[in-house]
Amino acid sequence: MSGEFCRFRMTVKDSLRLRCATAEDAEFAFAVMKETMREYAVATWGTWWDEESRRETVEQVSSGRTEIIELNGLPAGIQLVERAKTHIQLVQLYIAKEFQRRGFGTELLKRLFVEAKESHLPIRLRVLAVNPAKALYERLGFVVVVRTPERYFMEWVP
């Protein structure tokens, strides 16, 4: 089942690659999500839901939906991509703080662009309004298609 979700792979020769998360990765996945998103959740909603976030992360890892981003074999973040008939949904792209601002997010998105072009599908995502990642997405060609007080819903069309 996990291969169905984690089918887009980076080659072994690349120093930056994706692999399907295993049950042993659940704690790492939660830690990265908390490290990268807690501040923005608190700024948006005034709180962070630790237990709910942990439970959701464990469910995503267990279902085979989460991928671990590795840099030279070391876990550096998590990615979750859902593929629908009408679009590719980037659900999560969280890079651990120690690996941020090195172009890894850009590289992963560019690789997703290749898949989108080959499948003739747009990529969609949502980002919290307070999250500076919005600037990265705009720089790479995503446009805001819907805005709510809490989020921007963005799309990139090949």
Image (spheres, grey):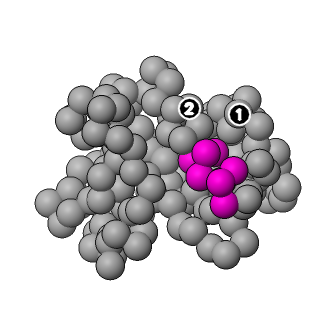
Q: In the rendering, which numbered label is found on residue 106?
A: 2
Labels in figure, total:
2
- The residues colored magenta run 112-119
> Mainly helix, strand or loop, the magenta region?
helix
Q: Is residue 4 left or right of residue 101?
A: left
Which residue is painted at 44% across and 44% down in the image?
A: 94
For the residue pair 42 and 33, the one nearer the viewer reads as 33
Identified by mark 2, the residue type is Thr
Q: Give the x, y percent position of residue 25.
A: 20, 56
In the rendered image, residue 48 lying in the magenta stretch gets the answer: no
Label number found at residue 140? 1
**Quadrant of the rendered image containing residue 98:** top left
Residue at 27% over, 73% down: 62
The x and y percentages for residue 35 are: 37, 42
Asked whether disc 2 touches disc 1, contact meaning CB atoms under 8 Å apart, the reply is: yes
Residue that appears at 41% across and 38% down: 95
Q: Residue at horizontal 41%, vertical 62%?
A: 7
